[in-house]
Amino acid sequence: MNDALKSLEQGMAGNGLDALLVTDPKHVYYLTGFASNPHERFLGLLLIRGEEPVLIVPALDAEAAHAASSVTTILTHSDTDNPYELLKSRFGGAVPGTLGIEKEHFSVSRYELLSAAVPAGQFSDIGHLLRAMRAKKTPDEVERMKHAAELVEEVLRRGLSHIKSGVTEIELVAELEYLMKKVGASGPSFDTMVLSGPKTALPHGVPGDRVIQQGDLLMFDMGVYAAGYASDITRTFAVGEIDSKLIEIYNTVLAANMAGIAASRAGATFGSVDKAARDVIDAAGYGEYFMHRVGHGLGMDTHEYPSLHGLNEDIIENGNVFTVEPGIYVPGLGGVRIEDDVFITADGPVTLTSYPKELTILHL
């Protein structure tokens, strides 16, 4: 049994769980090393206290599961089987007092099928156990995330060469997502965002057919998956000479980004990171134009625990990885966001992203 499964088994005892069932494919991968997309088919990792774990996979994934999974007991089901009967058979007629499930992942229909087959006395959520485990990254996980950051930065470097007269936002998106595959990434970790001019004032704007123009701000928010882990970076550029007000906004956001990273230390609260960045923007008179949290956890998901908002009093720990991404968005004028991926160590914060942050002027 690997370290992650041992940790989860310890959590079972501490939470009074007789058994637990993991069904989110990302968590199955995290715990076993087997990655798949089962679509509508059932995939589950079953742990019964005191017994070896069991992985249940669709029959068409059997060979891949045996090759990749650290769990050696693997059961399969065909498209005509009822996989919940496999679960029922593992309990040998006994009914668990408390069965842990991922309530955020389990649909109502699947819950009804499960409870009919395994009528446990109580179904308890195990989301907090998995969230706590995933929040502290192992050295291997950090290396994967560092690699994902390196790949997306290479994509950005190459992508900038496609900025020329007449190019549109959506054309740049197409080039960037093509380059992601070309450099070796699995694909984008979220919808690639390229915004220009006044559209940069939209924190979650949608790239379209707007042509990049002289005097624009040009914002790239993008990430890739590599070996199951995500990167997430935002950089904002100037296209030719830009308004002096936009330069002031850029420098303010850069100072806020650096302040947020400096505040990212073990023992501090997640909320204090938001405050450190927000104080810089407030002091410059742009507080009303920074309307989102300063960051979010990063790992197998682009957005995971923790949420770095001002009211989060949870404590930062060594091994946490999260983004620091302050922004200022002035309607009708434009916006700037600068985002880095930050890894917490005993020696302080380490940025996994390293693309230069000084204001860079691009030329059409």
Image: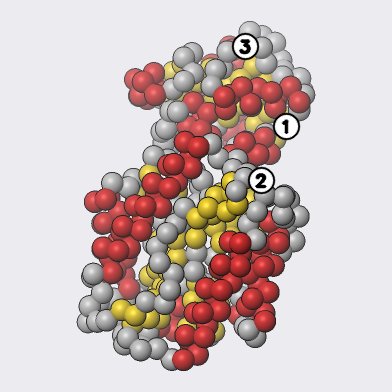
Q: Nearer the viewer, mark 2 or mark 3?
A: 2
In this rendered view, identify the residue nearer to me: 66 or 162. Answer: 162
CA–CA distance in space, label 3 to label 1: 19 Å
SS type, badge 3: loop
**Circle 3 Cα neighbour tier, 10 Å, few/some/many (<14 / 14–19 / ≥20):** few
- Type of amino acid under label 2: Glu
- Checking the image for residue 346, the label placed there is none
Q: Nearer the viewer, mark 3 or mark 1?
A: 3
| Residue name at image x 60 percent, y 52 percent | 348
Q: Position of residue 272 (x, y in %)?
A: 71, 61
Q: Position of residue 263 (x, y in %)?
A: 65, 61
Which residue is identified by label 3? 51
Q: Which numbered disc, 2 or 1, marks the residue that appears first in the sequence?
A: 1
CA–CA distance in space, label 2 to label 3: 32 Å
- Checking the image for residue 124, the label placed there is 1
Q: Which numbered disc, 3 or 1, marks the residue that appears first in the sequence?
A: 3
CA–CA distance in space, label 2 to label 1: 26 Å
- Type of amino acid under label 1: Ser
Q: Position of residue 80 (x, y in %)?
A: 42, 22
> Based on the displayed image, in which of its 4 quarters is residue 346 positioned?
top right
Which residue is identified by label 2? 317
**Circle 2 Cα neighbour tier, 10 Å, few/some/many (<14 / 14–19 / ≥20):** many
Q: Are marks 2 and 1 in contact (CB under 8 Å)?
A: no
In which quadrant will I find the C terminus? bottom left
| Residue name at image x 52 percent, y 73 percent | 254
Residue 27 is left or right of residue 162, and the answer is: right
Quick check: 8 above or below 343? above
